Each structure stands twice: as C-alpha cells, then as structure tokens.
Amino acid sequence: MTTYSLLLLPGDGIGPEVMAETRRIVEWTAAATGVTFEIDEDLVGGCAYDAHGEPVTDATMEKALAADAVLFGAVGGPKWDGVGYDHRPEGGLLRLRKELALFANLRPAICYPALADSSSLKQDVVEGLDILIVRELTGGVYFGEPKTITDLGNGQKRAIDTQVYDTFEIERISAVAFDLARTRSNKVTSMEKRNVMKSGVLWNDVVSETHKRGYEDVELDHMLADAGGMQLVRWPKQFDVIVTDNLFGDMLSDVAAMLTGSLGMLPSASLGAPDPKTGRRKAMYEPVHGSAPDIAGTGKANPIAMIASFAMCLRYSFQMTDVADRVEQAIASALEAGARTTDIAKPGEAALTTTEMGDAVLAALESNAA
Ligand code: NAD
C-alpha cells in the first residue's frame, strides 16, 4: 500500500480557512485511491511567532525536511507589522524555501472557460490561456550579499541589494523549464535584462548553452523582461513556458495572475533537485495569494488556489497524474455549474462561502467519478 507523508502549514489569515477545504480533498483522494496520506499539521508565520517567538521553529523545519511534500497556506498580516525584520512572518516562508532548497517555482496561469469574462482583459485575449511561469526561487537579489542599509553620516543612507547568479543555478532552472515544456507545447521563453545587467548576460548565455546541450527539440526564445511584461498583457497566448529569475519572476507571475481573474484561483509548486538515490524532490505547494487580512474570518476566501496547489502536489510529488486531472476537472466543473466565491462573482451574483466552494468541488469530484 502506498503511503505519503504530508505536512500542512496553514499559517495566518485565510490560510487555515483554505487549508481546511483542501484537507477535505486530500481525504477524498485517500478514500478514492486507497493511497494513505500521513498528515501532520504545524504552525508557520505570525501564529508561530506568537507561540514560539519565531516564524518557523527548528522542529517544524525538521518535519518539513522529512515530509514527502509540504502544503503551505499563507502568512502575515497587520498584527505583525511591528515585528523586527528577522522575525517577520514571511521569514518563515523564506526559510522553508531556502532550507528545502526549493529553487524552482512553478506558477501556472490557466483561464478557466467559465471565468474568461471576469478577467480585466478582453475575453479573446485570455480565453483558453494556459501558460506556466518557472521562476528561480533561491538566488538572485532577494538573497544576494551584501544586503545592507548603511548610514553615510551626512544625513544620507545607502541601501544595497545584490543580484547574483552562478552558472549552475541558471542551468538547473532552465533544465526544469525545458523538461516541463516537453510535456506541454514545447516552447520556452527566457526573460532577463541583458541590456543593462551582467546577471542578464550570464542568464541568457547559460540558458542558450543548456538548450544546445540536450534540449534542441524545444523551441527557445529570449525576451527582455520589461518587453515580456508588456507582451504578457498584450497577447499572453503567445507563451507556453516562461523561465526567469527570482525578481522578474515575482513580478511577471503576479501580472499573469491577473490575466486569469483572481489571486484566489492561482496555485504554485516549489521544487528542489531530485535526490540522486530516490529520485524524489523536496517540494512545497502553496497558493500565490497572501493571508488576505481584509477578508480573513468572513468566509469569503476562495479555496480554489489552495486546492489546485494540492492537485499540483499529486502531479509533481506523487505522480498521481490521473487524480490531479480529476481534481482540476472538478474545479472546472464547479465553476461551469456557476459556483462563485465573492472574488470571482459578478456584481449582484450570489456568492458561496469558502466551505460551500469546497462542497461544490467535492460534489463535482463525486459526480465526475460516478
Ligand atoms: P493578499 O494576496 O493577501 O491579498 C490581496 C487581495 O486579494 C486582497 O483584497 C484579498 O482579499 C484578495 N485575495 C487574496 N486571496 C484571496 C482568496 N483566496 N480569495 C478571495 N480573495 C483573495 O496580498 P496582500 O493584501 O498584499 O498581503 C496581505 C498579507 O499577506 C501581508 O502580510 C503580506 O505580507 C502577506 N503575503 C503573504 C504571502 C504568502 O504567504 N505567500 C504572499 C503575499 C502576501
């Protein structure tokens, strides 16, 4: 009998609300497939700071390192705005990404047919959209040293962040992008700023070299990241897989997010390198959205991004592709049948609560299975 260990880290704000609905989908999956999920749950973010004085404890890190996969909700909120930089809730997320060495962040932007008219872009621009942004997650300017603010003593301060990439970091992220492209429409667009940044020059060279050394069957384009942002809103369907660095990936994936209507719809996966012995990758799955303090506790949170993140977990950590397809199809069916939380409802349209949306996805799973 197959057994997988799952660590759930619901976090703050709407994190626990969307995680509760996802847990029901995990339980449905176990019942439908006979796979056992050994589920553990722990604190991360502001709630961990309140309980332990740090946003993620060493004990929680040990559990995360040992688990087959981690499902992460969201962290942060105004309650912790005054907490020092080293203990801020987001520090828990960064520590998890860093220590699990999750260098590849996969963010699909899929426009469900039932929601094509709720994007801020024209329907024909987004209808049928299915792109994947592969963002480098453990390097670049968010981690590079020096990272300082210095008092210059003349009434001025100087802030320094350092953008730094080594060859191996670019090689491994581009290999992930090329491998994924082969399972999709076989096209990769690499984005950087080689016109003004040395890291962009190296990025461009290494992606091209990696392409030549084993991926020439995949179509490769290079685009400057600012032009890429413009093209994403002009005609996003020209893209299949976009590979880019940590900073540009952060921004471009949020732009892509809005193509699909709501942050509440967008899942993500963060993957590490395959273990040479077992072939298994460390992995964490999380919605793109944050803790949404403005709606926390009101039952308005859309659980689809978190549920779809579990579908990615089934696909990338457990190779349960059929079940992942079924969960994604159930989301599409629920939307097709008119299920809407407030964030995706049209003005005047009735909206479901978080739990009711969970009910709708479960009902679609049951009826699609029947
Ligand atoms: P946010 O993503 O939390 O919210 C932005 C807007 O989208 C809000 O109006 C919110 O109500 C809405 N929204 C987000 N998720 C939704 C969902 N599932 N259903 C319905 N509506 C949803 O971003 P923010 O407001 O900039 O940040 C709030 C807090 O979250 C901050 O403390 C921030 O640091 C943190 N944050 C955490 C993460 C993370 O944990 N990965 C990511 C982004 C922001």
Image (tube, rainbow, N blue to C red):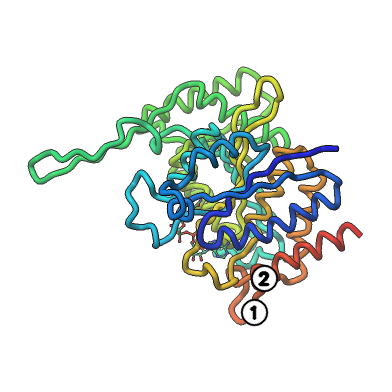
Residue 126 versus residue 21: which sits nearer the camera? Answer: 21
Name the residue rendered at 9%, 40% in the picture.
153
Does residue 192 appear left or right of residue 330 in this picture? left
Residue 81 versus residue 197: which sits nearer the camera? Answer: 81
Q: Residues within 10 Å of mark 2 (few under 14, many from 20)?
A: many
Does residue 117 appear left or right of residue 365 in this picture? left
Spot occupied by residue 52 in the image (x, y as percentages of width and height): 45, 49
Q: What element carries label 1?
A: loop
Spot occupied by residue 206 in the image (x, y as percentages of width and height): 51, 22
Mark 2 residue type: Arg
The single residue placed furthest to the top in the displayed view is: 213
Spot occupied by residue 18 in the image (x, y as percentages of width and height): 62, 60
> What is the distance, in whole Å, between disc 1 and disc 2 at their CAs?
8 Å
Q: Is mark 2 on a helix, strand or loop?
A: loop
Name which of mark 1 and mark 2 comes first in the sequence. Answer: 2
Is disc 1 in contact with disc 2, using a CB cutoff of under 8 Å? yes
The residue wearing badge 1 is 349
Q: Say whether mark 2 is within 8 Å of ligand 1.
A: no
Residue 301 in the image: above or below residue 278 = below
- Displayed quadrant of residue 65: top right
Name the residue rendered at 86%, 52% in the picture.
32
Quick one: quadrant of the C terminus?
Answer: bottom right
The single residue placed furthest to the right in the displayed view is: 370
Does residue 327 appear left or right of residue 66 in this picture? right
- Displayed quadrant of residue 115: bottom right
Name the residue rendered at 66%, 57% in the picture.
111
Mark 1 residue type: Glu
The single residue placed furthest to the bottom in the displayed view is: 348
The residue wearing badge 2 is 340
Residue 201 in the image: above or below residue 230 = above
